[in-house]
Image (cartoon, rainbow, N blue to C red):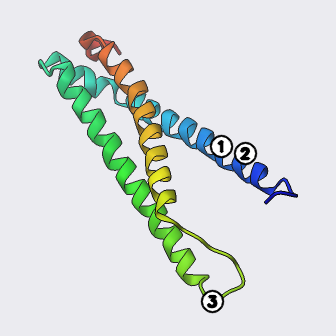
């Protein structure tokens, strides 16, 4: 730990993974919003409030975050269980679960905010444009 650059390289890998994950999640949410602007416009034209649309997007972000976090933690735990009798070192403390959960929360919040901004600014008249 003291005489090699492994901790720095590992930390940079984690940071890069976080940045790439945030970018992909943001782009995915934005793409979902772009593809469904007409549907959001229809809902707005029918009188749906911005608060209701905001809750729809937040629910989607929460569901995607919980499912993604659960799959990630589950697959990591299975990997650790499969490697328990090998020479490969595997440590999965509860602090790592909390830290990764906070990271997923930040990424999902960032991605949802991008989509929310687009939907809130949407004019219901977009439904009538071809």
Residue 88, compared with residue 48, is above or below; it is: below
Image quarter of residue 23: top right
- For image coordinates 49% across by 40% down, the residue present is 25
Would you say the residues marked 2 and 1 are in contact, meaning their CB atoms lie under 8 Å apart? yes
Numbered mark located on residue 85 in the image: 3
In 3D space, how far apart are the residues under numbered discs 2 and 1 (Cα atoms)?
A: 5 Å
Location of mark 1 (residue): 15
Task: Give the SS element for disc 3.
Answer: loop
On-image quarter of the C terminus? top left
Residue 82, compared with residue 124, is above or below; it is: below
Location of mark 2 (residue): 12
102 on left or right of 121: right
Image quarter of residue 69: bottom left
Q: Position of residue 118 (x, y in %)?
A: 38, 19
Mark 3, Cα crowd under 10 Å, few <14 / some 14-19 / many 20+, is few
In 3D space, how far apart are the residues under numbered discs 2 and 3 (Cα atoms)?
A: 29 Å
Numbered mark located on residue 83 in the image: none
- For image coordinates 46% across by 58% down, the residue present is 97
Q: Position of residue 122 (x, y in %)?
A: 32, 14
């Amino acid at each position: 730990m003291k005489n090699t650059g492994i901790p720095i390289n590992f930390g940079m890998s984690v940071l890069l993974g976080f940045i790439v994950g945030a970018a992909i999640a943001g782009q995915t949410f934005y793409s979902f919003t772009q593809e469904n602007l007409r549907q959001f416009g229809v809902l707005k034209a029918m009188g749906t409030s911005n608060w209701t649309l905001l809750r729809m997007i937040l629910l989607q972000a929460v569901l995607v975050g919980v499912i993604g976090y659960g799959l990630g933690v589950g697959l990591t735990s299975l990997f650790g269980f499969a490697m328990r009798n090998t020479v490969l070192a595997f440590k999965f403390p509860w602090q790592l679960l909390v830290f990764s959960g906070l990271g997923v929360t930040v990424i999902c919040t960032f991605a949802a905010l991008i989509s929310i901004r687009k939907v809130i600014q949407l004019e219901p008249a977009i439904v009538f444009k071809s």
